[in-house]
């Protein structure tokens, strides 16, 4: 083991100028700009649903889209804050509010369907296209997110990656609602929102693999040159 | 030669040990570790205030603005400011970490301090000079301490302390008569004589204990090329060490 004094001298000699990380809010905006462009392109290429203009007049539909977008923005902010040491903890709770509005709106719609039609209002059918669509639309934003958070400190790898995946998944949900004509609340809750949840936790499992101190320090050790004859 | 590769060797070894002994059991979460060890609950210790003059402030305030200034200068590449900063925070960090580790874990204090310093160095670009320095440093310390605790818990679940290992170790001392031949300086001198590609491969794979994939990423060479360079490097090294001996 090298003694601490030697380590300090070696680190000091290696102190090259560094480019400071922009603040989390600015980084979240940068990511949102890129991710929204990707989702919009995807929606146009896939073809937006024919009844979109009418659906946008539906309050519940619009509220869910806005809540999805807000969740994406807040989760991105939380992800970028979680890689900055000493950042305030309350930012990590920000996604909870839009997430509650989002699930609350879907839950309310389910309740209304059940109240109006009875148990048939919550009819369940397989709709396996949702998960691959969410994964496909969310892939590029998620990869961009991972690339950006890897520039920070891997303090809470799983939490950071979960927030990043939630941000990408929520945006993918918005994209999917624009192209996929599925409006039964229970189906949307299970297949579309459920896919976002699966996407989030599936990415989160790889948190320690995607973000680790080992990788950060290995990059420094590999990039450093011999400093001084000892 | 003193390089970051060398100073990181002990860290590489502990990381390698961690990854080899990865347990399927559930890891203790950071929050649980913090709770169990009440990290930073009583920060800072009274004696620290005496040592640094303004350390009695709570963590959320800029307890020592000079450190913030030195860190900002270090980000601009001011080596002297960085050296001064590291020399000032190291003994303070050691005291703070030592208060959290007791019993057999006390022996890990220097490891944790060095881990914190190395981690701080590797993410120094995340420091925002508009914000106080100490909360930034303490967050790194808190997480590195929790990481060490996780490693320790994992290790302890797989290791049993025994009083005597007669069956495992021979009474006869090892034959150290040829140890001069593998003296550190001699080995490093021999490595320095290797052609650049072989030297790089030996440094990354044998001294830094990187995996082939990591070394390939660091050098841009293919795994096959690294294997060939390592094989040739080891062969040449044997010959060189024979000559030195």
Image (cartoon, coloured by chain):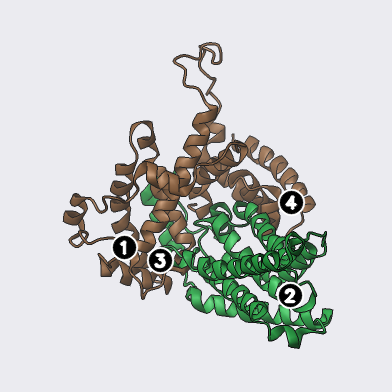
Chain colours: A green, B brown
Q: Which residue occupies the foreground of this view, B146 or B51?
A: B146
Q: Which is in the foreground here, disc 1 or disc 3?
A: 3
Residue of label 3: A88
Please check whether the numbered discs 1 and 4 fall on a single chain: yes
Q: Is residue A89 above or below residue B24?
A: below
Pick whichever of labels 1 and 4 is earlier in the sequence.
Answer: 1
Say which quarter of the image contains residue A110.
bottom right
Q: CA distance from mark 4 to mark 2?
A: 49 Å
Q: Looking at the picture, tell me which residue is in the foreground, B41 or B124.
A: B41
Which is closer to the viewer, label 3 or label 2?
A: 2
**How many angstroms separate mark 4 from mark 3 (CA)?**
44 Å
Of callouts 3 and 2, which one flags the residue occurring earlier in the amino acid sequence? 3
Contact check, label 3 and label 2, Cβ < 8 Å: no
Task: Say if labels 4 and 3 share a chain.
Answer: no
Tell which subunit mark 1 falls on: B
Please state the horizontal and vertical placement of residue A50, each as a whole percent of the image.
82, 84
Q: Between A83 and B12, which is closer to the camera in this rendering?
A: A83
Label 3: which secondary element: loop
Label 2 and label 1 in one chain: no
Give the residue number, with chain letter if any, for mark 1. Answer: B84
Q: Which chain letter goes with mark 4?
A: B
Question: In the rendering, at what x and y percent does residue B184 appear?
Answer: 52, 40
**Residue at numbered disc 2:** A177
Q: CA distance from mark 3 to mark 2?
A: 33 Å
């Amino acid at each position: 083991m090298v003694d601490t004094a030697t380590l300090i001298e070696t680190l000091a000699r290696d102190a090259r100028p560094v480019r400071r990380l922009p603040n989390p809010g600015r980084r979240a905006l940068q990511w949102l700009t890129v991710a929204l462009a990707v989702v919009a392109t995807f929606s146009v290429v896939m073809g937006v649903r024919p009844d979109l203009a009418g659906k946008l007049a539906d309050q519940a539909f619009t509220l869910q889209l806005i809540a999805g977008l807000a969740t994406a923005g807040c989760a991105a902010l939380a992800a970028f804050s979680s890689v900055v040491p000493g950042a305030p903890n309350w930012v990590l709770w920000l996604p909870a509010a839009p997430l509650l509005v989002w699930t609350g709106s879907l839950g309310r719609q389910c309740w209304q369907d059940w109240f109006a039609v009875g148990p048939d209002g919550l009819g369940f059918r397989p709709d396996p296209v949702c998960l691959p669509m969410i994964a496909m639309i969310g892939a590029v934003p998620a990869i961009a997110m991972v690339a950006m958070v890897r520039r920070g400190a891997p303090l809470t790898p799983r939490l950071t990656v979960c927030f990043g995946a939630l941000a990408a998944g929520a945006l993918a949900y918005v994209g999917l609602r624009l192209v996929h004509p599925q409006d039964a609340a229970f189906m949307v809750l299970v297949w579309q929102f459920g896919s976002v949840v699966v996407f989030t936790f599936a990415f989160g499992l790889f948190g320690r693999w995607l973000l680790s101190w080992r990788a950060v320090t290995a990059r420094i050790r590999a990039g450093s040159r011999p400093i001084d004859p000892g | 030669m003193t390089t970051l590769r060398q100073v990181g060797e002990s860290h590489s070894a502990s990381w390698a040990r961690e990854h080899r002994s990865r347990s399927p059991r559930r890891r203790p979460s950071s929050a649980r570790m913090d709770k169990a060890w009440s990290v930073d609950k009583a920060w800072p210790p009274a004696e620290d205030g005496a040592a640094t003059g303004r350390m009695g402030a709570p963590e959320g305030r800029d307890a020592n603005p000079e450190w913030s200034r030195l860190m900002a200068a270090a980000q601009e590449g001011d080596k002297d400011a960085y050296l001064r900063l590291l020399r000032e925070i190291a003994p303070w960090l050691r005291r703070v970490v030592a208060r959290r580790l007791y019993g057999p874990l006390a022996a890990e204090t220097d490891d944790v301090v060095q881990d914190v310093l190395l981690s701080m160095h590797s993410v120094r670009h995340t420091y925002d000079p508009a914000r106080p320095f100490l909360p930034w440093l303490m967050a790194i310390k808190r997480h590195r301490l929790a990481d060490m605790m996780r490693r320790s818990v994992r290790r302890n679940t797989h290791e049993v302390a025994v009083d005597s290992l007669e069956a495992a170790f021979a009474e006869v001392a090892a034959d150290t008569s040829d140890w001069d031949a593998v003296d550190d300086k001699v080995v490093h001198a021999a490595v320095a004589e290797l052609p650049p590609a072989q030297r790089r491969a030996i440094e990354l794979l044998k001294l830094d204990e990187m995996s082939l994939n990591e070394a390939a990423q660091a050098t841009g060479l293919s795994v096959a090329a690294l294997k060939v360079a390592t094989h040739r490097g080891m062969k040449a090294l044997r010959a060189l060490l024979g000559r030195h001996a």
